[in-house]
Image (spheres, helix red, strand yellow):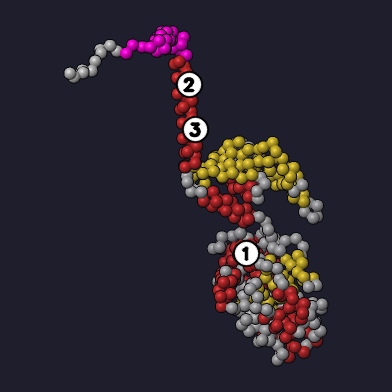
Amino acid sequence: MSENPVVSDKKPGPSKDSSFFSDLYDNLNQNPYFNAGAGLAGIGIAMSFLRRTAQISNTYFRRRFMINLQINNEDAAYPWLLDFINNRSATQTRNLSANTVVHQAESGKTELSISFLPGHGTHFFVHDYRWIKVERQREKQVIQRDGIRTPFETVTLTTLGSDVKFFKRMLEQSAKEAIDNAETGLVIYQAVGPQWIRFGVPRKKRDIESVILDGRICEELVEDFQEFISSATWYADRGVPYRRGYLFYGPPGTGKSSFISALASHFGYSVCLLSLSERTLDDDRLNHLLNTAPPNSVVILEDIDAAFVSREDPMSNHPAYQGLSRVTFSGLLNALDGVACAEERLTFMTTNYVERLDPALIRPGRVDRKQYFGNATDGMLSKMFSRFYRQPSDSVLADEFVKRVSEHKTELSPAMIQGHFLMYKQDPRAALDNIKNMFKTV
Ligand SMILES: Nc1ncnc2c1ncn2[C@@H]1O[C@H](COP(=O)(O)OP(=O)(O)OP(=O)(O)O)[C@@H](O)[C@H]1O
């Protein structure tokens, strides 16, 4: 006999416990106060969930689609960056902070310069087609800077994007702008004993374009210099001594010295002045000085003819040239040849009398480039006039000036022309009308 399973249609009845919970649930469900509380709690939980989700998505979004840069005022780039931001946003923002700098010259003259920087708080500016948010914050902490206690500050920049190099490029650009704007001036060295010592305060840099030369001479010399200073590896690879010698020759007052200084400052080089006629200079000291010139500097040997003249030239026996210097001719040649060091060496020699120089002194290797600086040509006269009186280059007055000077058929040096203009600084017409005065001094 098969045993059929007993099927019961009786549902398993709730136990004692479950009936307790079900009653409780029913009671609570019918209780309006509880229902309202549960609703509120539900809303609270949902809100907190949403807030958390928003925070996570915000953090994710910021990490994935935004880049940040934080910099504080202990960093050297901090003022450059503020200036950079300032140049782009300070005109649009109304929240500015003033930065006043007091300059006191050695003479005691005091000058104030006030610049405005983005103030503390939030600013926006556009750089490279992107909006950048700037948050400048001041902390309670204080730092010591140049002996002055300054509040600790941070600047945070934020922008959309994922290219982290964006801020790197921006910082590099701000550094470049800061360096370009810095009035560094031309540093001059003079030889004291066996050393090069800085001479006075840096001089104001002279714009290379202010030295007016004929044709393309200026451009060619700039290209030549540039080519040399960027060829260190080329010289090293071929074992060629990394040095270049220039000889600038021509009548007095044609801009030889001015051009060397302008060229040096154009490339951020300093200038080392050395006179071969100096009585305390001997072969050893000369050799030492030429080989220990400060980095990024050019050495200028002015009026080289006054120290040495061609052995074949009758002038060499002229009393004016005797006993001037203790440097011997062969000592100078050896010093110019120098040791074949990896350091670059740039030497400029100037003379008014190239024909008096010994060929050994100006052979390639000692002088690699000779350049003639001549008296003013018509083109130079016109450029000088236009530049001095700030006239357009096709000015009628400049043309007239050239015409009238040419009528005299006498060469004038740019120094003489500059001297004439200085007498009529504010009055180009008077400079024209008094042209004959210039020729009285020739
Ligand atoms: N080509 C020029 N363009 C503008 N200014 C010039 C030029 N040549 C000379 N000068 C002016 O004349 C003055 C003397 O110039 P600089 O000393 O450079 O001439 P130099 O050729 O070196 O003279 P020297 O051969 O006598 O040493 C400077 O004040 C300079 O400004």
x and y percent of residue 304 in the render?
71, 79
- List the residue tagged with mark 1: 266
| 269 in relation to 8, above or below | below
Q: Amino acid at mark 2?
A: Gly
Mark toward the viewer: 2 or 1:
2
- List the residue tagged with mark 2: 44
Q: CA distance from mark 3 to mark 1?
A: 54 Å
Q: Mark 3, residues whose alpha carbon is within 10 Å: few (<14), some, or many (≥20)?
A: few
- List the residue tagged with mark 3: 55
Mark toward the viewer: 3 or 1:
3
Q: Amino acid at mark 1?
A: His
Element assignment for label 2 = helix
Based on the displayed image, in which of its 4 quarters is residue 277 positioned?
A: bottom right
> Could you say which is closer to the camera, residue 314 or residue 146?
146
Does residue 345 show up?
Answer: yes
Q: Is residue 380 left or right of residue 294?
A: left
Q: Residue at x 72, y 43 (%)?
A: 143
x and y percent of residue 55 in the render?
49, 32
Start-end of magenta stretch: 12-37
Q: Residue at x 48, y 48 (%)?
A: 163
- Image disc number at residue 108: none
Does residue 409 show up?
Answer: no
Q: Is residue 308 left or right of residue 66?
A: right
Residue at disc 3, CB closer than 8 Å to ligand 1: no
